[in-house]
């Protein structure tokens, strides 16, 4: 039975983890954490977030980033797409009238646009597409290393432009809950990096479990302020369409600029997946630190939708690139 369900999800290209996140949202909507339970969940979330960034610091190799300097043109295109063009697009979409973009989720679009690229997905899809995997590893690592500092700064800057912004307390929390664990992981990498690589499956469970905890805590707080009375099904449909437009625009841009700059097809695939993907793994824990508990659920809606769309679209695109890379059949 379980295998049949997995097979059906694979055919539909639906990530089972996304279903787990949606189930967590439903559970938080029906059984939100309240009172002392909410305090316990909030503390566990802070610990989980710190642990996630400690593990990210221990896993990411600075040497991999340095080794990729030879492909500086490729990495520059990806980083400019991730941290310049995407945020501008997010700001423009978030400024649309409230009958198109609900005011409650508009900051979430800005947050989505400022997130770093994924690591696992970008590298995995590049490998399937027979692209430049070494450059994908370097670029994704650089994006995540930089994202720890750049994403909060961009979010604060763009939200301030809309009359919002982040408090000093948020930046203090970034320092204590994100940067300190991340740097500690980097410093301890030489001693624990091998252990983490050998137990990648277990550390992945910690990552994913922490994200589920963040989602539960976020939507518990959001339910308390009436998220489902402020965001209707029509709002979710419009938000989904905007995420699809963002995804299509990023894919179209990365392909166009790659060909305009005459990158080989292997590098084109790397730029496409590195530039169009956004990281839920980094986004969920970071949102729990940057934003008040009551608003985190609203902030996470766009990245949760975008993440599923990017998985389905990039799976199909990677297959297309793989077919292009296959040698023609020889007829004897």
Image (tube, rainbow, N blue to C red):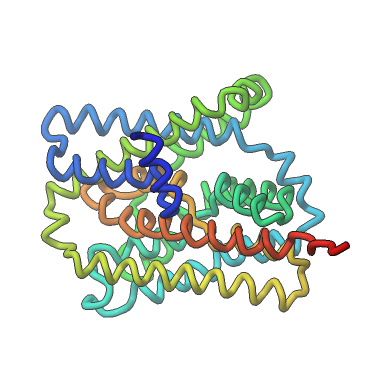
Residue name at image x 46 percent, y 38 percent: 178
> What residue occupies the far right of the structure in this picture?
332
* x and y, in percent, of residue 332 in the image: 88, 62
Q: Considering only vertical position in the picture, is 105 above or below 9?
A: below
Which image quadrant for residue 226?
bottom left
Residue 27 to residue 85: above or below: above
Q: Is residue 171 visible?
A: no
Residue found 39% across the figure and 43% down from its top: 16
Using residue 45 as the reference point, say whether residue 57 is left or right of it: right
Name the residue at 43% across, 63% down. Answer: 157
The N terminus, quarter of image = top left
Q: Quadrant of residue 196?
A: top right
Q: How many marks?
A: 0
Query: Residue 180's spot in the image, x, y percent?
Result: 50, 33
Residue 322 vs residue 330: left or right?
left
Rendered location of residue 251, percent (x, y): 55, 69
Which residue is painted at 20% across and 30% down in the image?
39
Instruction: Measuring from the top left, give residue 95's x and y in whole percent.
Output: 33, 76
Q: Is residue 276 left or right of residue 161?
A: right
Whether residue 3 is visible, yes or no, is yes
When asked about the image quadrant of residue 84, the answer is bottom right
Residue 6 lies left or right of residue 139; in this view the side is left
Compare residues 117 and 147 and report the one nearer the observer.
117
């Amino acid at each position: 039975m379980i295998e049949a369900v997995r097979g059906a999800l694979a055919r539909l290209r639906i990530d089972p983890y996304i279903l787990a996140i949606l189930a967590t949202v439903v559970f938080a909507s029906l059984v939100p954490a309240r009172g002392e339970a909410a305090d316990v969940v909030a503390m566990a979330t802070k610990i989980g977030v710190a642990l996630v960034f400690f593990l990210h610091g221990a896993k990411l190799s600075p040497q991999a980033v340095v080794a990729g300097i030879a492909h500086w043109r490729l990495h520059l295109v990806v980083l400019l797409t991730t941290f310049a063009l995407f945020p501008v697009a997010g700001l423009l979409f978030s400024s649309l009238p409230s009958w198109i973009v609900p005011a409650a989720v508009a900051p979430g679009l800005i947050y989505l646009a400022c997130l770093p690229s994924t690591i696992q997905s970008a590298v995995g899809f590049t490998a399937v597409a027979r692209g430049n995997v070494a450059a994908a590893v370097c670029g994704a690592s650089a994006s995540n290393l930089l994202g720890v500092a750049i994403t909060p700064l961009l979010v604060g800057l763009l939200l301030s432009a809309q009359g919002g912004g982040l408090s000093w307390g948020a930046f203090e929390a970034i320092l204590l809950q994100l940067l300190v664990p991340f740097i500690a992981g980097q410093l301890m990498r030489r001693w624990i990096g091998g252990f983490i690589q050998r137990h990648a499956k277990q550390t992945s469970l910690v990552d994913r479990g922490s994200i589920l905890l963040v989602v539960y805590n976020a939507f518990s707080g959001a339910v308390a302020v009436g998220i489902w009375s402020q965001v209707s099904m029509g709002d979710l449909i419009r938000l989904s369409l905007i995420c699809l437009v963002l995804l299509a625009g990023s894919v179209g841009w990365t392909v166009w600029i790659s060909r305009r700059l005459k990158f080989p097809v292997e590098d084109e695939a790397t730029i496409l997946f590195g530039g169009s993907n956004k990281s839920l793994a980094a986004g969920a824990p970071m949102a729990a630190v940057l934003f008040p508990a009551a608003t985190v659920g609203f902030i996470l809606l766009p990245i949760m939708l975008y993440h599923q769309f990017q998985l389905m679209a990039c799976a199909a695109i990677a297959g297309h690139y793989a077919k292009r890379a296959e040698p023609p059949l020889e007829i004897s």
